[in-house]
Amino acid sequence: MKERYIKQVEKELALPGKAKKEIARDLNEVFASALEHGETEQQVIQRLGTPKEFADGAAEQFGVDNTAAKKRKDRIYALAACIIAVAALSIYAIAGVRRGPAGAIGQADAATNIQVVGTFDVLQIILAAGIAAALVAILLTIRSISKNRR
């Protein structure tokens, strides 16, 4: 239980590795001292609070806003999803303009009587990826805005 708590605290911390190790070492000392004085691991965890609460408090002692790095990461993910969406939809639009008439094969100017069965249209996958990336960008932006309002 103690190890899981400490790992979760480390995961919640937006600090350099050295600071994380220092906090983990301090937590181990807190647990060891408390156990020597008759406290259980569960009692220590209740006293310390949730891993997120403890991590936020520890980061504050180091003069770091623990939530700023996570907000920045969310913004980067939203921007990356937006860029992917724009790129995929642009490729789809450009390739759609250059397409010949329906039923034309290769660089033909007109339709032919030859039927090609089982073709693989990469443009449909690019379109789906663009739409999915746009949805992800929208959802991440909404989530970021709602977190900022709290």
Image: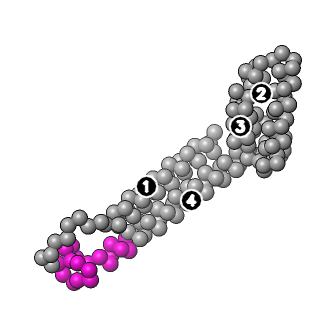
**Which residue does the numbered mark 1 point to in the structure image?**
132
* Vertical position of residue 80 compared to residue 105: above or below: above
Nearer-N-terminus badge (2/1): 2
Q: Which mark is residue 124?
A: none
Nearer-N-terminus badge (3/4): 3
Marks 3 and 4 in Cβ contact (< 8 Å) = no
Q: Position of residue 149 (x, y in %)?
A: 62, 42
Between disc 3 and disc 4, the foreground one is 3
Q: CA distance from mark 1 to mark 4?
A: 14 Å
Nearer-N-terminus badge (2/3): 3
Q: Which mark is residue 7?
A: 3
**Which residue does the numbered mark 2 point to in the structure image?**
48
Marks 4 and 2 in Cβ contact (< 8 Å) = no
Taking the image as shown, residue 77 lies to the left or right of residue 53, namely: left
* Secondary structure that dominates the magenta span: loop
Specify the color scheme.
Answer: one colour
Image quarter where the C terminus lies is top right
> Considering the numbered disc 2 on the image, is that residue within a helix, a strand or a loop?
helix
Q: Residues within 10 Å of mark 1 (few under 14, many from 20)?
A: some
* Vertical position of residue 89 compared to residue 65: above or below: below
Q: CA distance from mark 4 to mark 2?
A: 36 Å
Nearer-N-terminus badge (4/2): 2
Marks 2 and 3 in Cβ contact (< 8 Å) = no
Q: Could you tell me the amino acid type at mark 2?
A: Leu
Q: Which mark is residue 79?
A: 4
Bounds of the magenta segment: 93-111
